[in-house]
Image: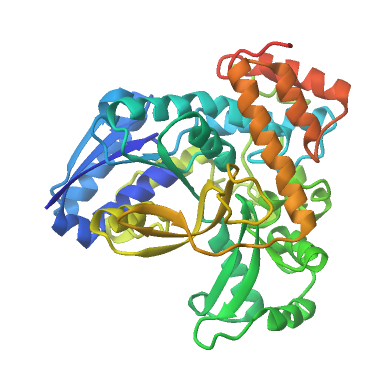
Amino acid sequence: MKKLKVALIGAGSVSFALGALNDMVLSERLKTQADLEIALMDISEANVDRTYNYATEMFTAFDYPAKIWRTTNLEEALKGSDFVIVAIEVERYFYWSQDFHIPRRYGSKQIYGENGGPGSMFHTLRNLGPMLNIAQTMEKVCPDAWLINYTNPEAKLVEAISKLTSIKVVGLCHGLDMGIHQLADFLEMEVGDIAVEGGGLNHFGFFTKVWNKKTGEDLYPLFHEKEKQANRLAQFEHVALSRTMYRTYGYYPYPGTNHTGEYISYAGEFYAGLALQYRYDPIREKLWEKGSRTPEFVYCAGASNLEQGLFDQTMTQELWTEQAYIFDKEKVHCSNEYAIPIIESIVFGEELHVNAVNMQNNGAIKGLPDDMVVETQAVVNKNGISFKPMTVELPTAIIGTIHIQGTIHKLLIEAYQEKSKTKLLQAILLDPQAPTYYQACAMIDEMCELQKDILPQLEWK
C-alpha cells in the first residue's frame, strides 16, 4: 500500500471538489493499493464542513477506509501532500457580474468576462495572490508535490505560478473534450472513434488534425462537407462562431462561442445570450448593494430558463449547490476530469495520454514563447507530466492573437508585483476588446474601488 496524501484546496467548490471526491471513491486502484489521506481545506468553515460531511457519508457508503479530515488552515492541509488540487473563488458570481458589466459600461465589447477581455484581468488579479500563497506555502511544506489547478483564468494563473515559484504546476480544463463532442455531432460519429491533435491557449484552441481512430482516415474533408450541409442556426450559441472561425482560419476551434469569443473583437454578434448575462432591471434593482441579489449567471440562451413557465422554479446557484450536497449513492459517477487519473498514473507508473493540459510551452506549439503557458496534449507517467512529442503549427493569424494574450499575461504579473495600475492599463489597451484610453483609465479606478476588499492595492505609476 502506497501512502498518498491529496489536499483539496477550495474544498467548498461544488463542481471540482465534489468531482474529485467522486473520482477517488470510485477508483479501485486507489482503494486497493493506496493508503489514502484526503485533506479538505477552505477559508469558509461552513463550506468545508459541508464538503466533509458529504465526503464522509460517501466514503462510508462505498466501504472505503480513507482518512478524511478538514481544516481552514492552509499550511496544515498542505503539509506532506503529494498532490494539491486547487479550485478557488470568493463569491464567484458576485464579482464575475462586476467583471462583466463594468468594462461594458466603459465601452468594451467583451463577452463573458471570465478568462479573456478586460474583466478577466481583474479576475486574474483577485485570484493571483491566493494562488501564489498556495504555491509558496507548498514550497515550504510539500516542495515536491504537483499543484493541479482548476481555478480560472487558467492560463494566466498557471503562468504566474510557473514563473514566480518552483512548484510543479499543471492546469486542467475539459474544453478540448467539448470540441471533440462538437466534431462528433457534425461528423455523425461516436466520440470514441475520433482522434485529434491541436492546441493553443486555454479556451482558444484549434484542432490541427482530426482522424478516424479505427481506419486512420483524415476526417477534415468529411467535416468540411458536413459543416456546409448543417443547419446554419443549429446550436447557434455553441458553434456559430466556431463555424465562422473554421471557414476563416481553416481549423475548427474549441470549446465554444462564449469562451473562444473572449479573445477576439468580433464575437458579440455570434452570442445570442449576451443580453442575458447577469440581466437585471436598473429601475427596480441596484447591483452589488447590501441586500441586493446577484443576477443569475446564464451560460447561454439555449441552457437558460427561457422556455420555462412564468412561475416555474428557477435553478439558481444556491438551489444547485443545495441539491449537489444531497448524497445519493446511485448518482455518484466519474467526473471525466483528469486530476485523479493523472494522480494514479504518476503514483502507479502507468502511461496516460491526456487530451489537454496547461503548462509552459517549451516548443510544443511552434511560434509561441517557450515560457508562455499553452494548452495541448500530454503524456503522464511515473516521471510526471509532459507535452506529447509533437509540434502543433497554427495559422499566423491565430499565433498573432495568442501572442497578444501572452504579452497580457506578462503585464498582469508585472502589475501584481509592482502594484501598478499603469501596467494593468497597458494590458487592457492591448486587448482586442479594449475601451478607449480615457474609458480604460476610469474603468480601472472604478473597479479598484468596487473590488478594493479583494483586489491587490494598485496605484498609478
Provide residue 369's location: percent of width, then percent of height. Answer: 64, 45
Q: In percent of the image, x 36 and y 31: which residue is there?
A: 47
The vertical placement of 408 against 32, above or below, is: above
Is residue 259 found left or right of 316 in the rendered image?
right
Is residue 194 found left or right of 441 in the rendered image?
left
Provide residue 95's location: percent of width, then percent of height. Answer: 60, 28
Q: In which quarter of the image is the C terminus?
A: top right
The vertical placement of 292 against 54, above or below, is: above
Provide residue 110's location: percent of width, then percent of height. Answer: 77, 40
Q: Which quadrant holds residue 450?
A: top right
Q: In percent of the image, x 52 and y 49: which residue is there?
A: 358
Provide residue 186's location: percent of width, then percent of height. Answer: 66, 76
In this rendered view, identify the residue nearer to me: 31 or 283.
Answer: 31
Q: Which quadrant holds residue 57?
A: top left
Residue placed farthest to the bottom in the image? 215
User: Coloured how?
Assistant: rainbow
Q: Which quadrant holds residue 208?
A: bottom right
> Residue 453, can we see it?
yes
In this rendered view, identify the residue nearer to me: 139 or 231.
Answer: 139
> Residue 72, can we see it?
no
The vertical placement of 24 against 449, above or below, is: below
The number of numbered badges drawn on the structure is 0
Q: In percent of the image, x 78 and y 47: which residue is there?
A: 264
Q: In percent of the image, x 34 and y 64: which residue is there?
A: 351
Is residue 345 found left or right of 390 in the rendered image?
left
